[in-house]
Amino acid sequence: MSFKFEDLPYSYDALEPYIDARTMEIHYSKHHRAYYDKFMAAIEGTELADMAIEDIFKNISGYSAAVRNNGGGYYNHTLFWNIMGPNGGGAPIGDLGEAINKSFGSFDALKTEFNNAAATRFGSGWAWLCVHDDKSLKVCSTANQDNPMMDTGCGGTPIMAIDVWEHAYYLKYQNRRPDYIDAFWNVINWDAVAKNYSKGIQG
Ligand code: MN3
């Protein structure tokens, strides 16, 4: 079995005050853990147990709802934890910064489009920044625990994401999803996003 439940790369309180410790603890140790455990149960003893998760997503329509929802939940949260960190925020530089300017016009234009995608996702889901085959960057959003790599998804390889399920923000922000989205920009680890971008443009 190649799927691991990775350690959170920082302490539960590391993203305070933007994301509170109680939310992080429940989100990681209960929600993410449950997706992982249920994903493992769904693929145990099947051919999926030895596949790359990208290959599972490519054909997700052919698999059960348990594989889709829990495989997505497992993968999406792992990406989410890794693109955040203490001392985050600021603006992306280097190749990623240039790619953002080229695709969106400016960093502020990316923020506007990303915030809009996250705020207008009805119900539960995610907003994404993805790199596509032509190396351009695009923003999209998906419902539930879907992601862009699924055969029904919005395409591209995700390099950054925000979880807009209520469990990601309700304890601190209640119904104020836009305030949580604004706060998210203060905890983005741009070095991690840049690494995802470098990998993504290699296909
Ligand atoms: Mn979540």
Image (cartoon, rainbow, N blue to C red):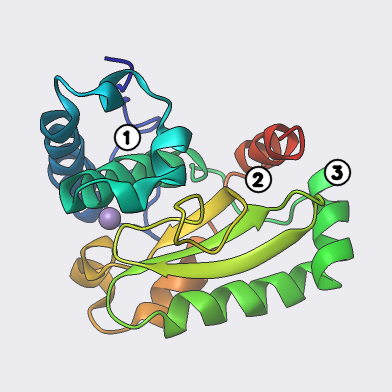
| Residue on which disc 2 sits | 190
Q: Residue at x 34, y 53 (%)?
A: 61
> Does residue 38 appear left or right of residue 91 in this picture?
left
Under circle 3, the secondary element is: helix
Under circle 1, the secondary element is: loop
Q: Position of residue 5 (x, y in %)?
A: 27, 26
Q: Residue at x 49, y 42 (%)?
A: 86
Q: Position of residue 13 (x, y in %)?
A: 30, 44
Which circle, 1 or 3, is nearer the viewer? 3
What is the number of the mark on residue 11?
A: 1
Residue at the extreme top of the image, as rendered? 1
Under circle 2, the secondary element is: helix
Of mark 2 and mark 3, the one earlier in the sequence is 3
Of mark 1 and mark 2, the one earlier in the sequence is 1
> Does residue 51 appear left or right of residue 91 in this picture?
left
Q: Position of residue 154 (x, y in %)?
A: 54, 64
Which circle, 1 or 2, is nearer the viewer? 2
The quadrant of the image that shows the C terminus is: top right
167 vs 90, nearest the viewer: 167
Would you identify the image quadrant in which residue 126 lies?
A: bottom left
Of mark 1 and mark 3, the one earlier in the sequence is 1
Q: Is mark 1 within 8 Å of ligand 1?
A: no
**Residue type marked 1:** Ser
- Determine the CA span between mark 1 and mark 3: 30 Å
Disc 1 crowd, CA 10 A, few/some/many (<14, 14-19, 20+): few
> Does residue 85 appear left or right of residue 27 in this picture?
right
Q: Position of residue 162 (x, y in %)?
A: 45, 60
- Determine the CA span between mark 1 and mark 2: 19 Å
**Residue type marked 3:** Asp
Q: Is mark 2 within 8 Å of ligand 1?
A: no
The quadrant of the image that shows the N terminus is: top left
